[in-house]
């Protein structure tokens, strides 16, 4: 089984990759279109040159890899994807051949996390519009994509992972609830910059508290993102 997990940044995406990566029967890949995205947009992200050197910049080659033989010939292949990487010129037809899952998070939490790092995202930086577009595309092919909320996972990791596995036709294993400290062998090269907190973890963080306050200057971004989130939330398991 090939599982494509679609989310925006500042979500639970790395922890979810570690969860599936701790299964003995599952290979993982970390944001395989990142280098292609940077090459095609010219954006200046932290560790840009290292990222460009670490992955193929050709999105067609990446798509072929994602639908080819599973790494290490493992039965399952979990793919962590960022929805904002799927810009014009990145193929989508390969998504017909994988199980598509959409990992959502309330945009207030995403934006507040950005603000804490002194970044000022616009709507397209946080992936909500692109996530909804990909969801609609998959549905138009007759698939029934799965939606899961990161808030629910943190509230009840075992219960929600069991529901997720059941929804995609995969047996749940308790190994998904924990992982070793220090990261995963298949972390992207950018992990050294971004994954410090997850590297120190051994499982999912506890339940989230009330929604955070969003800085006034980012309120328009929240207003733009909320309809996309609410649309996806209505479909969650």
Image: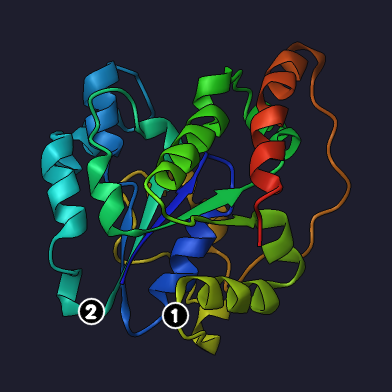
Q: Residue at x 52, y 39 (%)?
A: 8
Residue 178 visible to the viewer:
no
Disc 1: CA contacts within 10 A as few (<14), some (14-19) or many (>=20): few
Q: Is residue 220 left or right of residue 88?
A: right
Q: Can you give x and y, in whole percent of width and height, for residue 111 in the image?
A: 68, 30
- Give the camera-side residue of 207 and 171: 171
- Give the camera-side residue of 9 and 54: 9
Q: Which residue is mark 1?
A: 170
- Give the camera-side residue of 48 and 218: 218
- Give the camera-side residue of 173 and 148: 148
Q: Can you give x and y, in whole percent of width and height, for residue 36 in the image?
A: 22, 32
Mark 1: which secondary structure?
loop
Disc 2: CA contacts within 10 A as few (<14), some (14-19) or many (>=20): some
Can you say which quadrant of the picture contains the N terminus?
bottom left
Distance between mark 2 and mark 1 Cα atoms: 14 Å
Identify whether 194 is placed above or below 133: below
Q: Can you give x and y, in whole percent of width and height, for residue 109 in the image?
A: 73, 39
Q: Which residue is mark 2?
A: 74
Q: Can you give x and y, in whole percent of width and height, for residue 108 in the image?
A: 75, 34
Q: Quadrant of residue 155?
A: bottom right
Q: Is residue 160 left or right of residue 128?
A: right
Residue 185's label in the rendered image is none
């Amino acid at each position: 089984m090939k599982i494509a997990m679609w989310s925006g940044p500042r979500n639970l995406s790395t922890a979810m990759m570690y969860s599936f990566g701790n299964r003995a029967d599952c290979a993982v890949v970390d944001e395989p279109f990142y280098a292609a995205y940077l090459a095609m947009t010219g954006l200046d992200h932290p560790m840009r040159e290292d990222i460009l050197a670490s992955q193929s910049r050709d999105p067609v080659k990446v798509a072929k890899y994602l639908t080819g033989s599973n790494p290490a010939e493992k039965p399952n292949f979990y793919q962590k994807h960022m929805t904002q990487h799927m810009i014009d010129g990145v193929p989508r037809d390969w998504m017909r051949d994988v199980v598509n899952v959409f990992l959502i998070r309330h945009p207030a939490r995403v934006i507040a996390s950005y603000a804490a790092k002194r970044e000022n995202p616009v709507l397209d930086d946080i992936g909500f519009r692109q996530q909804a577009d990909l969801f609609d595309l998959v549905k138009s092919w007759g698939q029934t994509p799965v939606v899961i909320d990161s808030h629910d996972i943190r509230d009840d990791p075992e219960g929600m992972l069991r529901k997720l596995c059941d929804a995609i036709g995969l047996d749940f294993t308790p190994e998904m609830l924990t992982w070793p400290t220090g990261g995963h062998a298949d972390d992207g090269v950018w992990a050294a910059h971004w994954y410090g907190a997850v590297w120190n973890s051994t499982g999912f963080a506890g339940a989230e508290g009330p929604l955070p306050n969003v800085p006034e200057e980012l309120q328009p971004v929240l207003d733009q993102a909320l309809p996309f989130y609410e649309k996806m939330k209505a479909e969650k398991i």
